Image (cartoon, helix red, strand yellow):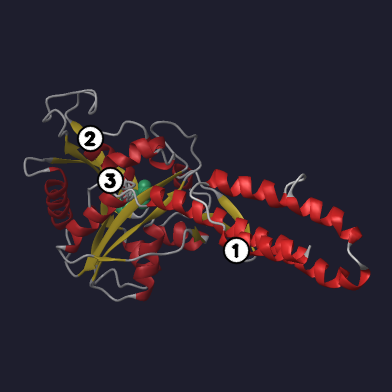
């Protein structure tokens, strides 16, 4: 029995295989339910007691060595399969998808770039505002009907009632309170209004407001600044048109239209056959607002303007539904790949 076992251990030791099937045959032969080991265990009861210990150890050794050999050979065949798969150098590489900038960011950056060329800086402020910065400092007295122009979302907070800012004019108040003229700054940011969501209205959108305060700033300066912007943004042939309007914080106030670049002002469905498109509101900062913010209105004057970034992006990229901006549909977003 001992010789038989030693011979078996040598056989296990020498065994090698060319194919996985040979490993399986070997396993059945040695360890299988009708295998050699099974017979050995059956014969074990006939081994004289004084030899049982030694023979038992040899049987266990056969079992362990055979199992170790099988595991090692299996691993070799599995690795061989995997390695032929992973080193297929002819396989095309996975596409490395890079994202694209959102059209709102593209247009926002372009507007900031245009105004920074004539000395405007960028300023930011909180989206949750108090009544003073969103309304009162801007000449909206309490109960004034002009507050209804901006359908406001109010929020309760530890500091009392706050509002989601309805415009970034609130940032301009903060700048005027904290800086001395001359001031020349742009306030880009997200604003909120309680509107039913449709193709033409949303409960949040993005504004860029501009503010220029210095000595002797006139309405002519405002008009020239906006004409410069319109030409840079929509092309040299662009014309602007100012219509009288009303805002509590500017006097006089105007709404600004640009000539329709889609039809060259001939009339089309984008400009509703008027040849012009409204893009922003503007005016001379009301002296009350300057005084509210601690600026001497006898010495300084200024202008302000505000525009919706979504609207400018709609005109620039001919987008016909505001909801596309916030739905995150990659088919829409992928169209802006490569734009900077
Ligand atoms: N704050 C105004 C709005 O949101 C826009 C505006 C800004 C108008 C500055 C005039 C001057 O409607």
Q: Nearer the viewer, residue 1 or 159?
A: 1
Please, is residue 148 above or below residue 67 in the view?
Answer: above
Which residue is outermost to the right? 49
Please, is residue 107 above or below residue 64 in the view?
Answer: above
The quadrant of the rendering that contains the N terminus is: bottom right
Number of dots carrying numbers: 3
Mark 3 Cα-neighbour bin, 10 Å: few <14, some 14–19, many ≥20: few
Residue 6 position, x and y percent, is 70, 66
Mark found first going from the N terminus, 2 or 3: 3
Mark nearest the camera among 1 and 2 is 1
In the image: residue 153, left or right of residue 252: right
Q: In this figure, which residue is indicated by the disc labeled 3?
A: 90
Mark 2 Cα-neighbour bin, 10 Å: few <14, some 14–19, many ≥20: many
Please, is residue 259 above or below residue 218 in the view?
Answer: above
Residue 123 in which image quadrant: bottom left
Mark nearest the camera among 3 and 1 is 1
Q: In this figure, which residue is indicated by the disc labeled 2?
A: 277
Q: Nearer the viewer, residue 302 or 184?
A: 184
Q: CA distance from mark 1 to mark 2?
A: 89 Å
Residue 255 position, x and y percent, is 26, 43
């Amino acid at each position: 029995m001992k010789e038989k076992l030693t011979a078996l251990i040598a056989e296990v030791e020498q065994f090698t295989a060319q194919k996985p099937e040979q490993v399986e045959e070997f396993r059945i032969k040695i360890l299988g339910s009708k295998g050699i080991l099974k017979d050995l265990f059956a014969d074990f009861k006939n081994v004289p007691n004084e030899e049982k210990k030694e023979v038992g150890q040899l049987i266990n050794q056969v079992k362990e060595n055979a199992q170790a050999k099988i595991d090692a050979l299996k691993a070799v065949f599995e690795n061989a399969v995997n390695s032929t798969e992973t080193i297929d150098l002819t396989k095309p590489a996975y596409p490395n998808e890079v994202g694209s900038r959102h059209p709102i960011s593209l247009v926002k950056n372009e507007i900031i770039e245009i105004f920074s060329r004539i000395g405007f800086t960028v300023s930011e402020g909180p989206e949750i505002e108090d009544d003073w910065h969103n309304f009162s400092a801007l000449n909206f007295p309490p109960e004034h009907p002009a507050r209804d122009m901006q359908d406001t979302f109010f929020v309760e907070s530890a500091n009392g009632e706050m509002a989601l800012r309805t415009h970034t004019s609130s940032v301009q108040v903060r700048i005027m309170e904290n800086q001395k003229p001359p001031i020349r700054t742009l306030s880009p940011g997200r604003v909120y209004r309680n509107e039913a969501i449709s193709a033409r209205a949303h409960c949040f959108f993005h504004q860029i407001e501009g503010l220029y305060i210095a000595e002797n700033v006139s309405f002519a300066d405002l008009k020239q600044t906006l004409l410069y912007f319109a030409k840079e943004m929509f092309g040299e042939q662009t014309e602007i048109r100012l219509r009288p309007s009303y805002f509590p914080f500017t006097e006089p106030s105007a709404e600004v239209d640009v000539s329709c670049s889609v039809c060259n002002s001939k009339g089309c469905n984008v400009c509703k056959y008027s040849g012009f498109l409204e893009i922003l509101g503007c005016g001379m900062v009301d002296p009350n607002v300057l005084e509210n913010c601690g600026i001497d209105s006898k010495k300084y004057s200024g202008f302000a303007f505000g525009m919706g970034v979504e609207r400018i992006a709609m005109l620039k990229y001919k987008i016909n539904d505001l909801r596309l901006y916030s739905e995150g549909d990659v088919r829409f977003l992928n169209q802006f790949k490569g734009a900077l």
